[in-house]
Each structure stands twice: as structure tokens, then as C-alpha cells.
Image: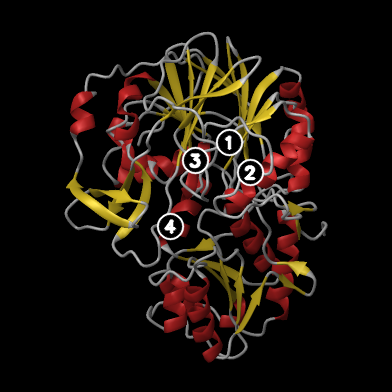
Amino acid sequence: MKTEHKQMSNDIVNAPGTQSAVPRASCSKQVLSKKFPRPTKENILVCPVGGVGRIGMNWTLYGYDGKWILVDAGSMFAPKHVEGVEAIYPDPESFARILPDIEALVVTHAHEDHIGAIHRLFPRMKCPIYATPYAAEVIGARLKEKKSGKFASIIKFQPGRGVEIGPFKIQTIRMTHSAPECVSLAISTGAGTVFHSGDWKFDPDPVIGKPTDFAALKRVGRANVRAMVCDSTNAHLVGETTSESDVAKGMEAVCRDTKGLVVVSIFSSNIARLSSIANAATKAGRKVALAGFSLIRNAEAAHTAGLLKNTPELITDLYKLKDHKRDKIVLICTGTQGEANAALARLAHGDDKRLPDLMRGDAIVHSARIIPGNEIEVGEIFSKIQHHGATIHQREYKGLPLHVTGHATGNEIAEMYDMIRPRFAIPVHGKAQHLEAHAKIALEAGVRDVAEPGEGIVYMVSRRSLQPVARVPILLEAHLKSEQGFVTARWDPINEKVIEKRKVPVGVIRKYKKRRQNSSFRTKNSRLAA
């Protein structure tokens, strides 16, 4: 097992309203335009639309020679006290002015905070989607479900392959994460290269797919990278991340030692974790069943993409559970964050007659981190489970891990800087303390300047400088739970409430209905029939 994560010194984390402890390419004292500038051939524009100062809703725009590409389009959950909101994400009206110039949406991996808004954006957006086979399957299924698949062209690429989109030449680089087929992007233009990390960690022994392509990362580092836009989630932690393969050992130990039913709650997108559990269960002589719509849907997408070839058969018809003894079953379910309608909550409350009743001798493994803010809901579910006499296992069992992070620690981020060797750094994907820790690592690695990150800030990256040139107000949209079709509202992040409810916003559709459909694709990629 790898080194235990420890908190970095927090002397760089500032109280609200204080100055940053590290030097930054600051825009706080500048009067900046509120409109997107037109990209030129002399430099590259980088704009984090979301995912900065928060965890979730990751979007990044890159501009060059009059064109843009959007990398990822994720969503985030509404605060717990707000009812009736399915997801929150940037409103396309925020960048309506440049919609005709967005050549493509490129997806790094199939996690909700990176793809959760995509099926809600079409047909308002009129550009093709580039994704790896698994992400393409997940996105295609959602577009089909929403009946908007006919508006979207999905182009599949294999991790490690290059794609050319308009003036952008993109080399995809195979990475490891808690989602399969995760990639980083080396985005090359006539004005230089920018490296976009996506979500990542260094896992030498992943359960699904191959390890990180270190040779490709080092090749990128020799290409005189202008800037690195990098994940900051665990920048405040030291040590090395634990391998997903170690989780399989912990799961097998639980399956062998438990006398009754074994239940494992996971994030529905964690296909590697599902495979680890299934293989561990088989070694312990148990069958595997899945409970939860999103989990089954993602498992089907992974199967179609060929990622579960070595995974035992999965039971998805829960009525068949009665055909097996409880000590011969592992039930993998959704509900790691205490969601009221998820499978784990239904199991705890006995609300689903297809599921067995919990009793003494059963074991529940919580194989996910509890996202801050969800502790009360998760605690209530745990109390109900313990009332039935079942045992709850978290974090580890007999010294073996039951969950590992999918994000790089500060040490691994420093190693990434040593390989990529960028001139400038743009920390993203994190709250203030994560971004500050990342900035400190980047400066210690020798970068010339670190961006003061903010959603909507447009940075001009040239050979000599990293300069903020605009700060575009990013409006947020809320997708509302409704039986009346696709209903949205403007989201007020200050007061945390919905305003301006609207059904099927069509203004952007009408305005850009004649958007040209053909981009300059030069790769031989297959299309998905959404």
C-alpha cells in the first residue's frame, strides 16, 4: 500500500478577504472587457468557464485563429436545502456570442462534473462531440433518452490518438483515474501548445485499461508547453495515491469473512470499482447484482465499449436475487451520498421489495468518499443500517483499502510539472485552498507565472506572458425536475435559488439554427448512432 495521505502545511491558505500568499497573474486591479475577445494567430486564449473555486461543473474554452473548442461540459448538484433542481451548469447564453465559432466539444472522461450538462445543451449547441468509446456510449445514451441525439454528432477516438479540429491539433494522452479511458490533452496551435490535464492520478496497476503513458507526457514536455491547465483536487495532500488493484484485495477479504449479505455502495460512474468488486466476489464464491438505474446504465455502456470483458456476469433483474442464498450474493448499489431515492436508502428503509431485508451478519461497504455537506444524510442511512444489525465498513478492512481517490496528490502534481515543464500554470478543478496549494507547487517547480483563477476570466497565453484580457460574466442555468418536458431556470448563486423559470429555451436555437454542420475533421473516427 502506498504512503498515507497527509495534509500539506496550510500556511498558504488565506482567510476570506486576505491577499494570496503566492504571486499571481492577477486581474483584480485591471478593468477588463466583459466580452470574449476574438482569438488571433499570435496567441492562445484560455477561459475556465466553470470548476474554479468549486468542485464540479468543469468547462474550459480554448481559442485560436478565430475559433474555439470547449473541453468538458459538466454539472454540479444544487445545495441540499434547494428542492426540485436536478443539476446546475453554465448557461449557454453566457457565451452565445461565440457559439458559432465553437468547433467541437472534447470530453476528457465520463464523470458527471465533466459531462453532466452535455445532454442538456443540445440542440442549443451545434458542434460535434469528441469522446473515447466509453464516454461516447454514456453521452449517446443520455442524448437518446432526452430525444436530442439527432442534433449531436459524436466522434469516437481511442486514448493516445491524435485528432485535428479546425486550427487545433490535439494529442490525447492515456491517463488513469476513477473513470475508464481518461485522457489528458496536448492542444497545439501555431502559437504554441497548452496542456490540459483533465482528472488524473498515477496508478501503476489499474483494474481497467493501461497505466499512464509517461513516455507521451515526456514527449509533450519537450514541445515547449506554454501553459498547463491542471486538476487541483488533492493538491493539499502529500504522499502517493493507492492503486485501484489494492481495493480488490480489501473487497475480497470482506466477501470471504462476511457470513451474510455483502452490500457495496459506489459512485455509479466508477466502472473500475465495479470490476474490482465483481472479481473479488467471484473469488469468494459469490454472485454479483446491481441496484440503481444510473449504475446499470453505466455498466451497459462499459460493456458495449468492451471494458468489462474480464468481469463476471452481473445480475440486473433484482427479482432473481431470491434464487440465491444471501451469503452467496454481493449487491453493488448507488447512494453513497445518502440520496433519498437511491438503492442504498431503499435497502436501509426496506422500501424496495425486490431487495432483501438487512439483518445481523450482513456487511455494508461504503466505497466512496463522503462529499462535504452530505454527512448528515449519509449518517442517517448508516444509523438505519445499524438498526438492522448490519456492520458498516469504511475506508479500510484489516489494513486493506476499500476506497482510493482518483485524483493526484501534491507530490504527483509536482512530478507532472517536472515532465510537462510549462512556462505558466493555470490551476483549476478545486476550491480556494486546493488552488492555492497547487499554485505553490507550480512556483516551486519553476513556472514563470501562475494565473489567479476565476470563472469567466479569459487569459491570453503567449511565449512571453500570461495576461488576463477579459472577465466574462458566467450565468448559471438550473435543470428543474418536471413532468412538462425540459424546464430550466436561471440560477442565482449568491442567494442560492432559482429565478426566471422557462420551458425549453429556444432563443439560442433560433439564433444559431443555420450554424454550419461540418468541421474540418481529419481523423478516421466512427460516429455513434445516438
Nearer to me, 337 or 207: 337
Q: Which residue is mark 3?
A: 135
Please name the amino acid that badge 4 sits on.
Ser
The N terminus: image quadrant: bottom right
Give the mark nearest the N terminus, 1 or 4.
4
Q: Mark 3 Cα within 10 Å, few/some/many (few <14, many 20+)?
A: many
In the image, taking residue 28 as reference, residue 192 lies left or right, namely right
Percent x, y of residue 92? 32, 35
User: Quadrant of residue 260 in the image?
Assistant: bottom right
Pointer 3 with pointer 2, Cβ within 8 A: no
> Could you tell me if residue 210 is visible in this image?
no
Q: Is residue 128 above or below residue 337?
A: above
Q: Is residue 389 above or below residue 441?
A: below
The span from disc 4 to disc 3 (Cα, nearest Å) is 14 Å
The C terminus: image quadrant: top left
Percent x, y of residue 124? 27, 33
Helix, strand or loop at mark 1:
loop
* Of the two numbered discs 3 and 2 in the rendering, the one whose residue sits closer to the viewer: 2
Q: Which residue is mark 1?
A: 452
In the image, taking residue 435 as reference, residue 489 lies left or right, namely left
The span from disc 3 to disc 1 (Cα, nearest Å) is 31 Å
Pointer 1 with pointer 2, Cβ within 8 A: yes
Q: Which residue is mark 4?
A: 294
Please name the amino acid that badge 3 sits on.
Ala
Residue occupying the point 47% across, 74% down: 377
Give the mark nearest the N terminus, 4 or 2.
2
* Of the two numbered discs 1 and 2 in the rendering, the one whose residue sits closer to the viewer: 2
Give the mark nearest the N terminus, 3 or 2.
2
Q: Which residue is mark 2?
A: 20
